[in-house]
Every structure is written in C-alpha cells, then in structure tokens.
Image (tube, helix red, strand yellow):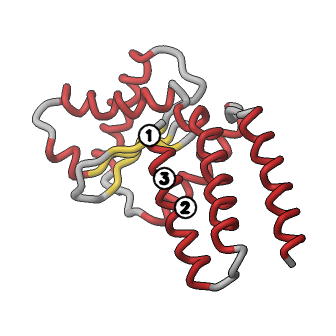
Amino acid sequence: MRRAAKASVALTTIFALLACASPRVLTVEEEQQLGNQARAQVKQEFQLMRDRATVMYIRKFGQELVEAAGPSPFKPTFDIVEDEALNAFAVPGGGIYVTTGTILAVDTLDELAGVIGHEIGHTTSRHSAKAFPISQRTNFFARLLGFIISAPTARRVQRNVGAVLTGIGSTAYFYSH
C-alpha cells in the first residue's frame, strides 16, 4: 500500500509541475459558458427582483455605463438581487448583479455608477478568466496536500482536518493574488 501511495504522490507532483509550467487563461467562449452556468446558479440561489420598471431602469443605466467604458468581449447583462446587503458582483461572461440594499443605500446616481462601473471593470478586464489558472493551481495543490496529510493513516478525522486546512490555505492564497 505504501508503494502505491508513493507512486500516486509522484505522479501527482509531476502533474502539478506541468500545471504550473503552463497556466492557461480561459478563452472568451469558455468564460461565456462558465458565465451561463453561473447565471443559472444565481437564479437558483437568489431571489431576483421582478419589478419590471426598476429592473429595466438598472439595465438601461448599466448599458449606458458599458457604452462609456469602451470595448468589451461580452455584452454585460444586469439584474437586481433582492437582498438587504450592500453588495454587487459580476460572474464570468458579463453577468452583473446589484443588491436592492445597495440601490437603496446610494444617495446619488454617481454612487450607483461607481458600484456598477466597478463590476463592469471586472467583466471587461476578464478578471475571472485571468484568475482561472491561479484557481486551478490552488485547488490542485490543496487536494495534493490533503492527500499527503491523510494518506499515511487514512483515518476519516485526519482526512477531514486535512481537507479543511488545505481549503482554508488555498482560499487565502487565491485571494492574496
């Protein structure tokens, strides 16, 4: 069993080195596909505002900001998440979401433009696609480390502790880049 574990670690290490040697940014098409999946997940997990007038206003306002921002590989879409939190986020491929809490908290359209413009910047700069190689390497090394920690004993508690620790570490590493 120890021989198989050592062989597995050796192969995993080789694949890790290959992954680091050739980081790959997502193509526009791949990012769009990922975005379609993310938008479907957002619709499942969040309540989107249905007030047609408000949604249309935010969409029109967002499109005006997109036109002022210059060229983009995507046609950003805008939706409102019914949530009191002060938040806005962009998903890969141009889906941009603003919470009702944010809309209610701003005092001027300039403040709202700043929030939405920030998310447009993530989309046009393709931050999701550029972060993909870091994410892939981080996840890979987290799984490798978890395997190395738990392989010698194969005890469930140690596997769980290894998974939690490597998850925390990989998240910290990802957000530091």
Residue drawn at point x = 27 percent, y = 28 percent = 113
Residue holding disc 2: 166
**SS at circle 1:** loop
Q: Which mark is residue 171?
A: 3
Residue drawn at point x = 48 percent, y = 36 percent = 177
**Image quarter hosting the N terminus:** bottom right
Q: In the rendering, at what x and y percent does residue 153 appear?
A: 68, 81
**Viewer-proximal residue among 158 and 20:** 158
Residue holding disc 1: 176
The earlier-in-sequence mark between 3 and 1 is 3
**Viewer-proximal residue among 20 and 110:** 20
Residue drawn at point x = 66 percent, y = 74 percent = 150
Query: Marks 1 and 3: in contact by CB < 8 Å?
Result: no
Q: Amino acid at mark 3?
A: Thr
The earlier-in-sequence mark between 3 and 2 is 2
Can you say whether 157 is above or below 124 in the image?
Answer: below
Q: Amino acid at mark 2?
A: Thr
Q: Is residue 105 left or right of residue 133?
A: left
The CA distance from mark 3 to mark 1 is 9 Å
**SS at circle 3:** helix
**Viewer-proximal residue among 148 and 94:** 148
